[in-house]
Amino acid sequence: MARIGKSLLILLCLSLLIIVNSCREPEEPAANQVNRLVVNDEQINESFREIALHEQEDMELYELILKRGKENGSLESLLDQAQVNREVRRKLLDQTQVTMNGSKKLVSQLQFSLNELSVEKEKTLALELLNLYEHRADTLEEFVSTYKQSLLADQRLYEMMRKDAEPDLVKIKQVLQMRNNEFAKLQELRRLFNQQTATFNSSNERLVEMKQRG
């Protein structure tokens, strides 16, 4: 009787396990989870496109300012436009940083859920993607910080040009050097960010292909 009782207990436990497992929510594919980061990136890409447009406008304004300065013309209206342009780019940078901060929080959530996946190949690649994304987020953070320093250098340069007194050429050259240094850093960070983006996108395509193969 005792053996029969133990056998019934084992069968009951197995039945309960089967019921519990059958009631579990189906796993969300890794590609779907990582896609949430890709969706957030669309807003970042849009901000970058807008920043690039304003950069082009700023370069044109800078050329006009130099030309008018050589001709001893009034610079006020052009300097005002340059100031507005800087503020627009600063806001776009802030917006980009807020979006990326949200994505970094999402990465922490995804690390937990992806670790629970049963398909090892998908889990391994998806966690690798999160690692790539975090490095890319760090690069973006440095890019935003450096870009803001560049905007401050621009602001100092244009403030010097507003003064009625004889411009201090030594100080202007110093600010120009700072501006050029920050610009060089920006170019390198932009190159690195684009490279990291390409690597992330390539790995993400592999994850999507895994999902499609089922």
Image (cartoon, grey):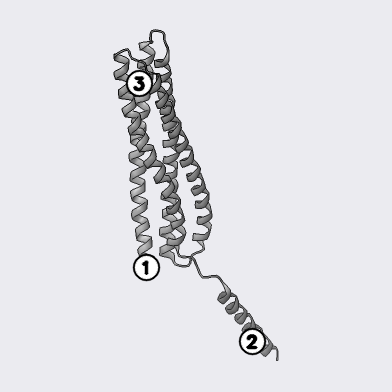
Mark 1 Cα within 10 Å, few/some/many (few <14, many 20+)? few
| Element assignment for label 1 | helix
At 35% from the left and 64% from the top, the residue drawn is 209
Q: In the rendered structure, which amino acid carries the disc numbered 3?
A: Gln
Which residue is disc 1 drawn over? Answer: 212
**Picture quarter containing residue 120?**
bottom left
**Picture quarter containing residue 55?**
top left
Q: In the rendered structure, which amino acid carries the disc numbered 1?
A: Gln
Picture coordinates of residue 36, whole percent (x, y):
46, 56
Mark 3 or mark 1: which comes first in sequence? 3
Which residue is disc 3 drawn over? Answer: 177
Q: Nearer the viewer, residue 60 or 184?
A: 60
Drawn side of residue 74 relative to residue 115, left or right: left
- C-alpha distance separating marks 3 and 2: 84 Å
Comparing labels 1 and 2, the label whose residue is closer to the camera: 1
| Element assignment for label 3 | helix
Quadrant the C terminus occupies = bottom left
Residue 48 in view, yes or no? yes
Residue lying at the far bottom of the rendered structure: 1
At 35% from the left and 41% from the top, the residue drawn is 192
Q: Nearer the viewer, residue 61 or 98?
A: 61
Which residue is disc 2 drawn over? Answer: 7
